[in-house]
Image (spheres, helix red, strand yellow):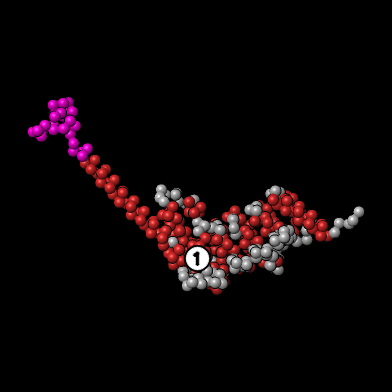
Amino acid sequence: MAAVTDSEKERELNARLFHALMENDKDVVIELCRQESTSDGPLHVTSIHKDTVLHLACYSKQPHLAEELVQLLPNNPNLRLTKLKNDVGNTVLHEAATSNSLTQVATVMIAKQRKLLTKRNILGETPLFRAVRFGKIKMFKLLAHEVDKDNQEVRKEQLQSKDGTSILHIAVITEHFGEFLCSFFPRPSCPPSLFHSINLFLYMYILKELVKSDFVRLFNHKNQTAEELLVDNYSKLHEESKEWTKRTSENCSIVGVLIATVAFAAAYTVPGGNQSTGIPKTSSTLLFKS
């Protein structure tokens, strides 16, 4: 019988890890990561796309498993967390940034290796950029708070890509804001164009409140600020919204006049009408005598 080679053992281990991850079997994943054969533990590369076990735990949105895996990592300033990227250049914090459910995991990751905040993927995105692109406000607030602790130059590096695009530009381009805003504001009875405009401007306002004012005036490669990009991209939508608002206010005015007319008539009209002399026909009834 032929001996089992190391490569075959690794393939078997990767298959077991992948299966356990997809089945959300946290106990099996933790047990396999603790085995001596899994020398890198949670940082063991387990897919053809160079994803580690921790990458996949974050990608599959398993916060409890991901947090336990991070806790298994040693407290070592030379930890390879920043160097372990998958084939699209994402670190484990990039993967965590795509879900609001992984904010605690992100907090623990940053505590282990703060330099994760500054790492970029092949698109030039930092984890903060990625949180904005996916519309994850809770995650964005956490990462923005951490970035805010750095000096201005480091902050600028994380809030602006190499081509000048800032996180506010990304917010305009990707439009991931509807779900977040609906959780705070009830959806109004209005056409999609107006609702979309409301969402855009509210989302921009919220992001600007969370970002240092120094970075609101950052210019992209077309020499546009985020607000100028917003106006440029959605001018037609804005005009449609204004037209709907104008028509609605006109209709409301007409209805208001009709209601006032009816109310006035009802208040000054005598039941039964008047005689030619102007005296009410019902003046002799109990209604008037009482």
| Residue marked by disc 1 | 169
Quadrant where the N terminus is found in the figure = bottom right
Residue 198 at x, y = what percent? 43, 56
Q: Was residue 29 drawn as part of the magenta stretch in this picture?
A: no
- The residue at the point 59 percent across, 53 percent down is 101
Residue ID at (46%, 69%)? 225
Q: Residue furthest right?
A: 1
* Residue 223 image offset from top left, x and y in percent: 47, 72
Q: Position of residue 251 (x, y in %)?
A: 31, 49
270 horizontally vs 204: left or right: left
* Vertical relation: 152 (above or below) 60: below
Q: Main secondary structure of the magenta part?
A: loop
Q: Quick one: SS at disc 1? A: helix
In this rendering, position of residue 209 left or right of residue 246 = right
Whether residue 214 can be seen here: no
Given the image, on which type of amino acid does mark 1 rest? Answer: His
Which residue range is magenta in the image? 265-290
Instruction: Tell me: 200 left or right of 99.
Output: left
